[in-house]
Amino acid sequence: VLAALGRGQLKSLEARVERRRAIRREYMNALSGYPGIDFLPEASYGRSNAWLTCITVDPQRSGMTREDIRLHLQARNIESRPVWKPMHLQPAFRSCRVRGGDVSQRLFEQGLCLPSGSALTPAEQALVIEAVEELCAARAGVAGRVLHG
């Protein structure tokens, strides 16, 4: 039964991927100009399906944390969440040896997953963008925005 459902969904896969890529582009167009807000790059060796749109928030450059943005969105009834917690920070693995971990830990501390499902409407996405822009303006002042031409 699950295989039949999966096969049926394959018919709309390309449209869903294109919708998610469009959502990511819209977020990037709207939010890339704010200091300290960056998007995880698309790998040079492939084409992302944009399954999830994540930003990183550099507190030094932006004057805020990813948690500030998450709480600001939550206050507007917009769900977002931190990037996954690395295994070496999970209680079950606390006593295990860690190899590397700096990149995953920084992404967890600074990364935020924005709403990006293929069913997200343009109006819903506009509310997310507006809320993030509102907080950016409040933290850095309107003059803090860098315009990209």
Image: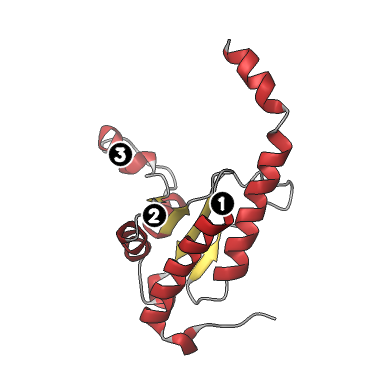
Res 16 quadrant in image: top right
Q: Amino acid at mark 2?
A: Ile
Mark 3, residue position: 90
Dot label at residue 78: 2
Q: Secondary structure at mark 1?
A: loop
Residue at the farthest front position: 123
Q: Secondary structure at mark 3?
A: loop
Tell me the CA gap for discs 3 and 1. 35 Å
Q: 10 Å neighbourhood of mark 2: few (<14), some, or many (≥20)?
A: some
Q: Which mark is in front, 2 or 3?
A: 2
Residue 100: % across, % down: 44, 47
- Drawn side of residue 46 relative to residue 118, left or right: right
Q: Nearer the viewer, residue 120 or 66?
A: 120
Residue 10: % across, % down: 70, 27
Tell me the CA gap for discs 1 and 2. 13 Å
Dot label at residue 121: 1
Dot label at residue 50: none
Q: Amino acid at mark 1?
A: Thr
Residue at 72% across, 53% down: 44
Dividing the image into 4 quarters, which one contains the C terminus?
Answer: bottom right
First along the sequence among labels 2 and 3:
2
Residue at 51% across, 54% down: 54
- Drawn side of residue 74 relative to residue 20, left or right: left
Q: Amino acid at mark 3?
A: Gln
Residue 34: % across, % down: 51, 76
Q: Which mark is in front, 1 or 2?
A: 1
Q: Nearer the viewer, residue 139 or 89?
A: 139
First along the sequence among labels 1 and 2:
2
